[in-house]
Amino acid sequence: MKDSMKEQVIEMLKERGVSLDDIAYLAWELQCPYNSDLTVDECKASLQRVLDKREILYPVLTGLVLDDLAQSGNLPEPLLSVIRRDEGLYGVDELIGLGITNIYGSVGLTSFGYLDKMKKGILGEMNSSQQDGGRVTTFLDDIVAALAAAASARLAHQDCVKKEKVV
Amino acid sequence: MKDSMKEQVIEMLKERGVSLDDIAYLAWELQCPYNSDLTVDECKASLQRVLDKREILYPVLTGLVLDDLAQSGNLPEPLLSVIRRDEGLYGVDELIGLGITNIYGSVGLTSFGYLDKMKKGILGEMNSSQQDGGRVTTFLDDIVAALAAAASARLAHQDCVKKEKVV
Amino acid sequence: MKDSMKEQVIEMLKERGVSLDDIAYLAWELQCPYNSDLTVDECKASLQRVLDKREILYPVLTGLVLDDLAQSGNLPEPLLSVIRRDEGLYGVDELIGLGITNIYGSVGLTSFGYLDKMKKGILGEMNSSQQDGGRVTTFLDDIVAALAAAASARLAHQDCVKKEKVV
Amino acid sequence: MKDSMKEQVIEMLKERGVSLDDIAYLAWELQCPYNSDLTVDECKASLQRVLDKREILYPVLTGLVLDDLAQSGNLPEPLLSVIRRDEGLYGVDELIGLGITNIYGSVGLTSFGYLDKMKKGILGEMNSSQQDGGRVTTFLDDIVAALAAAASARLAHQDCVKKEKVV
């Protein structure tokens, strides 16, 4: 049952309304200006490889659990309020995102920042639902942005290797 | 002459067509959604404090010197070509940017990534001039984005402290 | 009551058997090879300034709360077991430490790594007690190492500024 | 000729008196407390995989070139003096090291800090030669420490995966 943590993370994302296709689509949007032949399916395959890495699953899991604990009120104050209102200076959510993107080099960093700030696609929906008093997504949006940036950076590195092999 | 390194960095930015006002304006754009009373002058004052820090000046200086050495051809291959064509996977320019924004916590990180990806304002001009065969700005654009993100994050932290004092 | 979060963090450290003097002593050990006049009191004063920063308090608080939740069994599996056994590949504790030391530039980074690996002084006691089935200190030891590294790096930067003013 | 950058980096390290065996030995020392069956050859094989990654080669190459430029006097002041005297607050050498270790998760970070601070083995020799007015190794020692930490962290991750497969 070696993949149980991966499956659990995918399940937790799904419960929060985020499918692997949603994340793969964000990765595709990041990468398609550089590679016009790229398909969303290739991005999804890249995301699968990203989620094979234990060093990625651990920060993802930690962030999602913190969102849950904030949602259910099972954190002490003042941490509970800080996470519930997605306090702009909190910064631990960005640290978690950084821990995820770093695995594919510093080039994923700017994509992560861009997605997180633009709140594109599924990220936009998450953010507005939190502001309406919905589910706590303080960590979720950074995690989704970071996973998309990681899947995209992974493809960028591979694409580069492929071109060199052809030449 | 304690400020010589700061003055030298400001001078180097100016030679490259980047004034402190340009950077302050980018910082203002980042921060104004959260603080509608903020002026560009306050952002410029914040940028001045950012540039007082030696740990910020060192990476800025290193990046600008690498751009210069690439411009004048005084780097060995393959590093020369990698920096000249702003190779997307190089990543050392993002590391330098990260070293600058980190000083103000991880919240500056997403602003840095956003500006760097969006190539806003002065960043857009720099980028198109490099693509036209103009000056090498591989490090410059990350440095400008990171300084704006740092000046903005510094204000965000101060604003938070002020509000708490009022309460 | 603006300092309530700072006071709460100091209290939480105390409950875990870590005083500000313990951390100040680690900072002094790091910095004294470079500044033989330095006193532990100056290190403690530096630590106080470090703990004035909200961007430091947030990751500290998050890590200590995660240790508590692991201690009391209030985390879902597999995260509970991972944190309880201080799984070497977990990495989120190091991310928290990195978020703390980064505020004082990348020079604090190696001190943090050194202390964390050497488990010096109070860190050594914490670590052996966890291995004996005592309190969960997965985040605590990284937090203590990072705070000491931050207090020490802060002094290094100040010392440098002072020397330049004299010259 | 796809491996030219890798071969060039290995050659540059060799010219500076650092063999892959030296780095593999440091990695082995880091990892052997956790895996008593590990051989230095396995560490060397891991280091070879680390050096296959473009995102690792770029920061290594940049640091080594900066050491060379400082050695030959081909950098402008004050950067030349800062790098030549391995100024403790410079911090860009640590950023380069961080960029290398990050690729294998945040667990390599503390090993990097530890090696860099302890100046173990070959690192000790490099450091004392610089203090005797020998070759500039400001970046070299961080690069060697970071490569050893990366090779070691890579093995730690693999070992974990293997154990799970057995179970």
Image (cartoon, coloured by chain):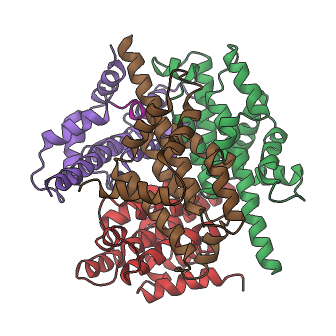
Chain colours: A purple, B red, C green, D brown
Q: Residue at the spot x=43%, y=41% of the render?
A: D47
Provide residue B3's location: percent of width, then percent of height: 67, 82
Could you say which quadrant of the image residue B103 lies in? bottom right
Vertical comparison of D40 with C96: above or below: above
Vertical comparison of A2 with C137: above or below: above
Could you say which quadrant of the image residue B156 lies in? bottom right
Provide residue C29's location: percent of width, then percent of height: 81, 47
Q: Residue at the spot x=56%, y=80% of the render?
A: D73
Provide residue B105's location: percent of width, then percent of height: 55, 54
Say which quadrant the C terminus of chain C sits in: bottom right
Q: Residue furthest left?
A: A37
Apparent side of residue A21 relative to residue A92 in the rendered image (left or right): left
Provide residue A12's location: percent of width, then percent of height: 33, 26
Span of residues in magenta: A53-59
Would you say residue B153 is visible in this rendering?
yes
Residue A23 counted in the magenta span = no
Q: Nearer the viewer, residue B64 or D13?
A: D13
Apparent side of residue A87 relative to residue C103 in the rendered image (left or right): left
Q: Main SS type for the magenta part?
A: helix
Q: Nearer the viewer, residue A76 or B140?
A: B140
Apparent side of residue C54 relative to residue B12 in the rendered image (left or right): right
Vertical comparison of B111 with B75: above or below: above
